[in-house]
Amino acid sequence: MRILITGGTGFIGCHTTVELQNAGFDVVIADNLSNSNAKVLDRIEKITGKRPDFVKADLSNARECALVFDTYTDIQGVINFAAYKAVGESVEKPVEYYKNNLGIFLNLIENMTHRGINYFVQSSSCTVYGEPDSLPIKETSPVKKATSPYGHTKQIVEEMLSFITKSTPVKAIALRYFNPIGAHESALIGELPNGVPNNLMPFITQTAMGIRKELKVFGNDYPTPDGTCIRDYIHVVDLAKAHVVALQRLINKEYKEDLEFFNIGTGRGFSVLEIIDSFEKSTGKKLNWTFAPRREGDIIQIWADTSFAEKELGWKAQEDISSMTLSAWKWQEALAE
Ligand code: WQD
């Protein structure tokens, strides 16, 4: 079965391509390469022995998006990763974020409804919850007012899907990611942010590699055990596998609602200092870091209640925190070769 993966040369997209191919699906990737590199296609082929088809396309452009579906008439499902995703940048460039992220989504759905393609998996985010009132957070926990255009586009897509899946044959699953980190065991694919990393893990590995002078820990006066923020970090391969089981649930018509949401995390939170400690222990590398003021927009703590995904998808994260931090380092080392 042919699946379209939009944004498939990105960090989570390429890991999901590998797991889909491992599960016997044929994949075509559509990506504008604005935040990724086509070299990833060679790496995927090296890992699975199968080179995914690829179309360079700006999917927010209606004509380019339709051309993908005109070219690959055997597409039967879509996994949508394609979006701009830098929280801070979205605050500076809201119009670009709304146009791009919502434009891509609407073009995809329009093509799907016109061509009888009914399976849609949406890359969503725990960002939709904002600062949780209670933890661990459930899919039924309230979605809070967005604190950035990036998070707002994630919420809007979920809301549009709730109407679209009721009035069209398209059925969907939105996976609410927590914090994906780590890399495939081959160290052939991994996180490769453009420029200075926003996210913690690539900043840690680049600091350990000497690319960055020191890691700044944003805030040590939060109401948490060690004063630093807590997040639910999940291995990107565990996250990728969740997309395969979500797609299979749609294909096998095992869904119980036209649109379903699943928290994809480990169910356990780690503080920034605990991540640093895990990194140093798993790699043997000493990290140069210092405390710095809080970062605007950071929530204090969040971690997932993953019981719904375990029960309904039969999915549970398998990799532990040392596997996440070590695999991230192995990938950083491979980049230096
Ligand atoms: C994690 C923790 C920082 C960098 C965001 C988006 C989310 C998703 C993942 C796209 C926080 C601290 C970080 C640094 C630090 N994005 N930190 N020094 O903010 O939880 O989630 O990225 O899909 O939607 O919201 O991830 O890795 O940026 O930060 O101390 O140099 O690490 O303050 O507590 P975040 P993050």
Image (tube, rainbow, N blue to C red):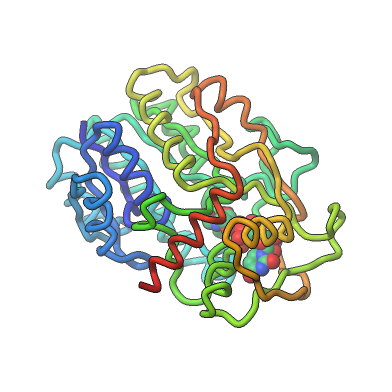
301 with respect to 258 (left or right): right
Tell me how many marks there are. Answer: 0
Q: Is residue 254 above or below residue 78?
A: above
Q: Is residue 119 among what the camera can see?
A: yes
Residue 127, x across and y down, in percent: 62, 50
Residue at 21% across, 36% down: 2
User: Is 124 or 43 nearer to us in this picture?
Assistant: 43
User: Is 113 or 224 nearer to us in this picture?
Assistant: 224
Q: Give the quarter the ligand 1 occupies.
A: bottom right
User: Is 260 or 332 nearer to us in this picture?
Assistant: 332
Residue 172, x across and y down, in percent: 42, 31
Q: Is residue 216 above or below residue 117?
A: below
Q: Picture quarter containing residue 171?
A: top left
The residue most toward the front is 284
Residue at 42% across, 30% down: 246
Q: Picture quarter containing residue 73?
A: top left
Residue at 57% across, 72% down: 208
User: Is 25 or 49 nearer to us in this picture?
Assistant: 49
Q: Picture quarter containing residue 319?
A: top right
137 with respect to 8 (left or right): right
Residue 80, x across and y down, in percent: 38, 45
Quadrant the C terminus occupies: bottom left
Residue at 51% across, 45% down: 124
